[in-house]
Amino acid sequence: MTEISDRPGQLAPRYARVALDLPMAQLGAAWFDYRLPPEQTAIGPGSWVVVPWGRGRRIGLVLELAERSELGPDRIRPIDAPLADAPPAPADWLRLVRFAADYYHRGAGEVALPAVPKLLRTPPSARARGSVFERARRRFDTVATASGADTSGSDIPSTGEASASGPVFSGTTREPSPAQREALAALSSDTGFSVSLLHGVTGSGKTEVYLQWLASFLARDETAQVLLLVPEIALTPQLAGQLASRFPGERVAVLHSDLADGDRAAHWLAAVEGRARVVVGTRLAVLAPLPRLAAIVVDEEHDPSYKQQEGVRYSARDLAIVAASQRGIPIVLGSATPSLESWLSARRERYRLLRLPDRIGGAALPTPQTLDLRGKTLRHDLAPAAIEAIGEALARAEQALVFINRRGYSPVLGCLQCGWLSRCQDCSAYRVMHRIGPARTAAANRYRLVCHHCGGEQGVPRSCPDCGDIDLQAIGRGTQRLEEGLAELFPGARIGRLDRDVASRRGAARRLLDSAHAGELDILVGTQMLAKGHDFRRLSLVVAVDCDGGLFAADYRAPERLFATLMQVAGRAGRDARASRVLLQTRFPEHPLFAYLARHDYDGFADWQLAERQQAGLPPWRHQALLRAEAATQADALAFLAAARDRGQALLDADPAFDSQVRPAVLDPVPMTMSRLAGRERAQLLVESAARPPLHRLLDLWLPGLREIAGNVHWALDVDPAEI
Ligand code: ADP
Ligand code: ZN
Ligand code: ZN
């Protein structure tokens, strides 16, 4: 602490506070101090540096320079070197990173480093130093000059010729409808930060509004950048085409996690260096440093995929709003079924609500009908009326979409004699049947039992492990089994399936969607993935096989998700104004959710859910943080959480600053629904608060002490958890 400068009165910074991608809460630090190399005047806040760590090297981000360090001079190691050729992180972005680190109670390096493509944050060997950036730049330029060329695997034609002269609009811009005109007029009145919620059903012209609005920023300022966040890029090929044709003179950078390393680095660098003015990406794109960002759109803002589910569990939608506010720029959130968080903000007039009430072209939305499953004999999980409707659609040479909210073959294998079930040995989950071999082979060779939670797998037993009976049956349903069932019911039909399994094969989702669009498929079977952003012109029937899982679930968000998914899936039908049908199979047809759905009454549904949540003291009325713990035994995990709860309670009792009316509550620890995961036991503890500031104040005081009591328990905090 008593560092004495060589030149008294003229303290020059000698140290750098460096953020590394390490679990900072567990290490009990916010950054690491390093000594500046003597001749390095270029290193400053935002510099990327190579630093020694243990016996190896790491890439770090300089947060700030300091004159002093609390570490003794002999304990401080020097920075190796700046990361050659790396563009420094802009100040705006550092501010966002530091906000996210504070808000999610993580280290800045845990936020910043994973946001950088792997290729660019690997410590270079002395020989290759710097060249990785040059290669990435050349790669993007090569793609950029080959007009319309595909950026290998990204599904997105990258750019046209770069010119930033002339209007960016292409001839494909449509004359806005009156509702679109009104929305655009309201948006064009913005100067500075504002949040607008654009609410309109699928096909109401939201995308057209986004594109025209974003184009106005590009036209106004030849260096401006715009950011469009989408939930899932590989599944929205139309958007790629639209962007390429709408911004013909622009370089479009595409950021998502399925890109090959080289492409990801190339696109990221083009965005960060301002060479790409249009940036489209999934949640990780919100953490790309965009120096000239002028406007942001978050499409399908309610989509759960905006919440990161590992590492720093950030919400890309929420961070996008923070980024807009920090920079003083406008942001548009779009959805047919806004999240209740956004809806409440609109109700409170914190967000401007803009509506597109009708579908373009006046095509009616189909009216979803429930199919009561009670007392019906199902064939392959389909009610007779559903089978009949599929048959009719096929007879008219139209397409049918059969939608199911699960993946894999039937979830569980069971013994009809003794009730044995294919439980996972390592988890509290069940292992489910996955088809691996062709239909001809014997069942035991055709399937494997796989745990979706820990990935554990095994062959299918030929007889019951408990009683020896050979009558083992698949219980429950899945997309594969449904596909097989449909093939049996409609032998001539061309059937295609889309779920996580299929989509995990590069290009497979795209191929399936292409053949669906080309009319080469009669029946599409799949999960929510089919519901996203596709426009199937020949589709006239949607059957939702299993709606009930979302009605009565442990997670209070399940009905909100079900409503959103069913609205979305219903929006797939009838785009060309044919008479379309949406059939919802359920054993609870009188549930209020279906009545709102049948009237397309999002407002009514949302207000009803908000009232229920208010009564129950749940978000968005209250705020939550979840402390998750993982240990060898459930007792260890629970004991840690109980000790954590006691500490939290003691902090609340001891500190008069916690106003008694908005004081957070620390609840009791509970084992998680999926309590056993990959051989580890998991439990969780909820902290709730009517207001955010006291919640974060408590977390700030509470988390540092958890280090001392954690022992061998792994823990992590989830602020605003999306799943309970
Ligand atoms: P959303 O994003 O709300 O689902 P889109 O913007 O994709 O809706 O519009 C639905 C369809 O209507 C698209 O095929 C789009 O090209 C077309 N469209 C949108 N706006 C107009 C317009 N003003 N005039 C003509 N067609 C339009
Ligand atoms: Zn048995
Ligand atoms: Zn398992």
Image (cartoon, helix red, strand yellow):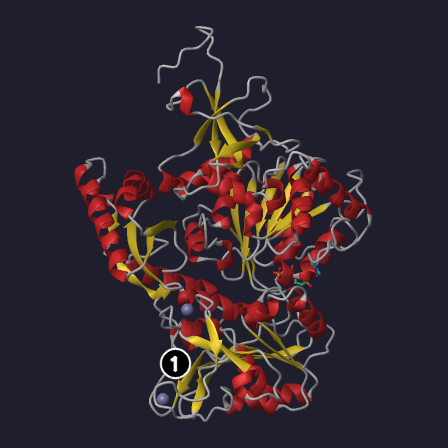
Q: Quadrant of the C terminus?
A: bottom left
Quarter-wise, where is residue 556 in the image? bottom left
Question: Where residue 690 sits: x, y (%)?
Answer: 29, 48
Q: Nearer the viewer, residue 495 or 337?
A: 495
| The residue positioned farthest toward the front in the image shown | 55
Vertical placement of 265 versus 549: above or below?
above
Q: Secondary structure at mark 1?
A: loop
**Residue at point 66% right, 55% down?**
208
Vertical placement of 93 versus 405: above or below?
above
**Label 1 crowd bin: few (<14), some (14–19), many (20+), radius 10 Å:** some
Q: Does residue 294 appear to the left or right of 343 in the view shown?
A: right
Reading the image, the residue beneath label 1 is: 588
Q: Quadrant of the N terminus?
A: top left
Question: Where residue 390 sits: x, y (%)?
Answer: 60, 86
Q: Nearer the viewer, residue 72 or 251?
A: 72
Question: Where residue 561 sits: x, y (%)?
Answer: 45, 65
Q: Amino acid at mark 1?
A: Phe
Question: Where residue 462 sits: x, y (%)?
Answer: 46, 88
Q: Is residue 275 visible?
A: yes
